[in-house]
Image: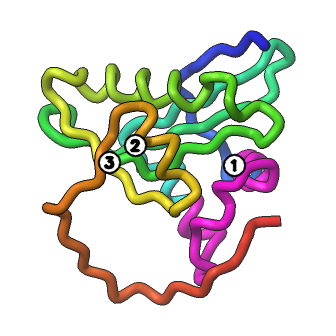
């Protein structure tokens, strides 16, 4: 399958439609979902979209970065029927390149257990030096 990765901002409705076709839709809390997704999409430092030949979305990667030292992957998803084709790897590689390159940038992310093998396969390791402050309401649900 051919696909092209571009920097672009998706609308809330486009992104929610995409989430319904991925396993990424279970990472968000139910509280103020629509409002918070819209803010994420507008404010992420880097927003990448992989599209197939017909223009359909097959993958998305969002990151927050200072473009000098740090990059945090907030979202990485690939449409279920296109996983295992290198789209996720290509999105992460492009995200890191745009943020400043692997020689300058330390990349972090939070993942669910099912995604750990993917991140290890692309060269990421579990960290012992990350601190968390979390007072947010978080009711689990899946975007459907």
Q: Residue at x 34, y 23 (%)?
A: 98
CA–CA distance in space, label 1 to label 3: 19 Å
Image coords of residue 100 (percent x, y)? 23, 24
- Range covered by the magenta-colored residues: 14-37
Image coords of residue 72 (percent x, y)? 32, 48
Residue 56, quarter of picture: top right
Q: Which residue is mark 1?
A: 15
Q: Which residue is mark 2?
A: 63
From the viewer's perspective, tell me whether residue 61 is left or right of residue 79: left
Disc 2 packing (10 Å; few <14; some 14–19; many ≥20): many
- Helix, strand or loop for disc 1: helix
Mark found first going from the N terminus, 2 or 3 = 2
Give the answer, above or below, for where 119 lies relative to 43: above
Question: Given contact means CB atoms under 8 Å apart, are the residues at marks 1 and 3 in contact?
Answer: no
**Dot in front, 1 or 3:** 3
Q: Point out the image quarter for the N terminus.
A: top right
Q: Residue at x 36, y 52 (%)?
A: 109
From the viewer's perspective, tell me whether residue 112 is left or right of residue 80: left
Q: Residue at x 19, y 42 (%)?
A: 70
Q: Which mark is residue 72?
A: 3
Question: Given contact means CB atoms under 8 Å apart, are the residues at marks 2 and 3 in contact?
Answer: yes
Towards the viewer: 143 or 108? 108
């Amino acid at each position: 399958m051919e696909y092209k990765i571009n920097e672009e901002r998706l609308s809330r409705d486009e992104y929610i439609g995409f989430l319904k076709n991925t396993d990424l839709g279970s990472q968000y809390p139910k509280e103020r979902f629509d409002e918070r997704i819209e803010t994420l999409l507008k404010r992420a430092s880097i927003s990448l979209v992989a599209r197939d030949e017909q223009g359909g979305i097959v993958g998305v990667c969002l990151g927050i970065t200072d473009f000098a030292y740090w990059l945090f992957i907030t979202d990485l998803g690939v449409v279920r029927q296109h996983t295992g084709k290198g789209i996720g790897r290509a999105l992460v590689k492009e995200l890191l390149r745009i943020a400043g390159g692997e020689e300058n940038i330390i990349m972090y992310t939070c993942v669910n257990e099912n995604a750990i093998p993917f991140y290890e396969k692309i060269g990421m390791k579990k960290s012992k030096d990350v601190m968390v402050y979390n007072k947010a309401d978080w009711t689990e649900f899946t975007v459907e």
